Image (cartoon, helix red, strand yellow):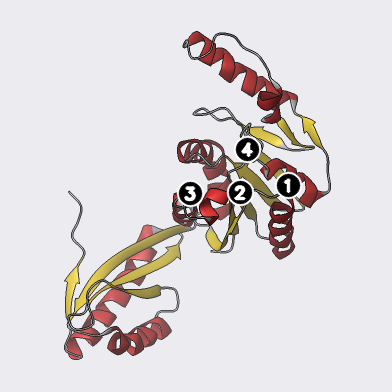
Amino acid sequence: MKQQIEIICIGNELLIGKTLNTNAHWMARRATSLGIMAKRITVVGDDVDEIASVIGEALQRKPRFIITTGGLGPTFDDKTLEGIAKALNCKLEVNEKALKMVKEKYEAYLKEGKIEKVELTPSRVKMATLPEGTEPLPNHVGTAPGVLINVKGTFLIALPGVPSEMEAIFEGSVAPLLKSEAGEVTFFETSIYADGIMESGLAPLIDQVMHDNPYVYVKSHPRGEERKPHIEIHFSTTAKGSKTAKERLGKTIIQLSELIERNGGKIRFQKKKQ
């Protein structure tokens, strides 16, 4: 994978362990499936200076994409847009396109009987106050728009922290962009399971197989106990077509399976989900 992404998750609730960071897991896996390599995941609190610092550091590495999650809402601790503005040394301004999105969302809430009147309070206008030169991304699930800006060849994208909103904006506006950048490259993966062989005994076999199959990444994940080893072996590759990927994975799996069995282990293949 030539194109790379860095993910920055923002929120004190992540740092104190109150909220499990499912956004990072979902986004890394989704980006990988689209042919984009996740190079780094960073978690930072609701602090403008900290946000600006990690964004600035990420921009220096020049990945094709930087995506932040969290901190786009109406409350005092939603600091992401301020942090982005500081990192880019630009001003925050009311974005008319974003304001229209926010207003239309509250008009929809009025029709649904969720609110009594449409009023663009300072807290609501805050969600449409974006760094200058940015493009708002529609949020069909929640209220706060996402944000997109091209910074010297890096797409900097800010998404909400609410998982359903993040995923909706990602699928609607971000996934097509990632797929376009990845081209025909697609990620493929599968797993087998080995019993009766310790991970220390498996390690040199994996090293040999990866040396012989440089386009395939092989990783062991112990699932059992030291006295009764049960190991998942995960195979992954990127290729321009399923035929090439299957050939690569198949050749690698056969070679490693034979080596494991020669060393007293047993192989089980992953059961297909019904």
Residue shown at 59% from the left, 51% from the top: 181
Q: How many marks?
A: 4
In primary-sequence order, the first of circles 3 and 4 is 3
User: Hey, what amino acid is under mark 1?
Assistant: Ile
User: Hey, what amino acid is under mark 2?
Assistant: Thr
What's the CA distance linking mark 3 and mark 2?
Answer: 10 Å
In primary-sequence order, the first of circles 3 and 1 is 3
Say which of 95 and 13 sits in front: 13
With 246 as the anchor, is 274 left or right in this view? Answer: left
Numbered circle sitting on residue 68:
2
In primary-sequence order, the first of circles 3 and 2 is 3
User: Hey, what amino acid is under mark 3?
Assistant: Asn
What's the CA distance linking mark 4 and mark 2?
Answer: 10 Å
Numbered circle sitting on residue 84:
1
Residue shown at 29% from the left, 85% from the top: 202
Say which of 74 and 128 sits in front: 74
Residue shown at 70% from the left, 35% from the top: 135
In primary-sequence order, the first of circles 4 and 1 is 4
Q: Which residue is mark 4?
A: 72
Disc 4 vs disc 2: Cβ atoms closer than 8 Å? no
What's the CA distance linking mark 3 and mark 4?
Answer: 15 Å
User: Hey, what amino acid is under mark 4?
Assistant: Leu
Label 2: which secondary element: strand
